[in-house]
Image: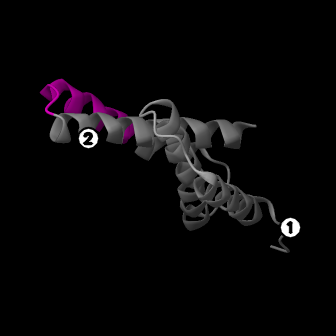
Amino acid sequence: MTAIGLFLAAGLAEIGGGYLVWLWLREAKPVWYGVLGSIVLIGYGVLPTFQSFPSFGRVYAAYGGVFIVAAVLWGWLIDKKTPDLYDWIGAAICIVGVSVMLWAPRSS
């Protein structure tokens, strides 16, 4: 459960921080949006270090899959852009891939 919680927290930090920077630079929001977004992105960089998985590459690859799902949900809930069937299928494929990468039985 800790791993999943860390994945979710990092996903929110990555997408939320990036979204704040996007709003600042692309939609002319005040500079504090960019500053806050940058601080949140630093938190995103730190959160994965708390994972218990030993491989940096594997953890970050798995984060990529989780972030795809989080981005689809963010777009739906925050940007009000309804995902289509192919968005959901792609997100499901990513979660299956993440699960295989992290929890497949390995001999070493």
Q: Position of residue 92 (x, y in %)?
A: 69, 56
> Is residue 50 one of those drawn in magenta?
no
Q: Which mark is residue 22?
A: 2
Observer-nearest of 67 and 39: 67
Q: Is residue 103 left or right of residue 46?
A: right
Would you place residue 52 above or below residue 82 in this image? below
Colour approach in the figure: one colour
Observer-nearest of 12 and 48: 12
Would you place residue 40 above or below residue 104 in this image? above
The tally of labels here is: 2
Q: Is residue 28 left or right of residue 36?
A: left
- Could you classify mark 2 by the number of other residues whose Cα lies within 10 Å: few (under 14), some (14-19), or many (20 or more)? some
**Mark 2 residue type:** Trp
The residue tagged 1 is: 105
Question: Most prominent secondary structure in the magenta stretch?
Answer: helix
Q: Position of residue 12 (x, y in %)?
A: 49, 36
**Dot 2 and dot 1 residues touching (CB under 8 Å):** no
The magenta-colored residue range is 28-43
Would you place residue 3 above or below residue 85 in this image? above
**Tag 1 or tag 2, which sits nearer the N-term?**
2
User: SS of the residue at dot 1?
Assistant: loop
For image coordinates 29% across by 33% down, the residue present is 20
- Distance from the alpha carbon under mark 2 to that under mark 1: 40 Å
For image coordinates 76% across by 37% down, the residue present is 1
Q: Is residue 36 left or right of residue 71?
A: left
Observer-nearest of 4 and 48: 4
Quarter-of-image position of residue 36:
top left
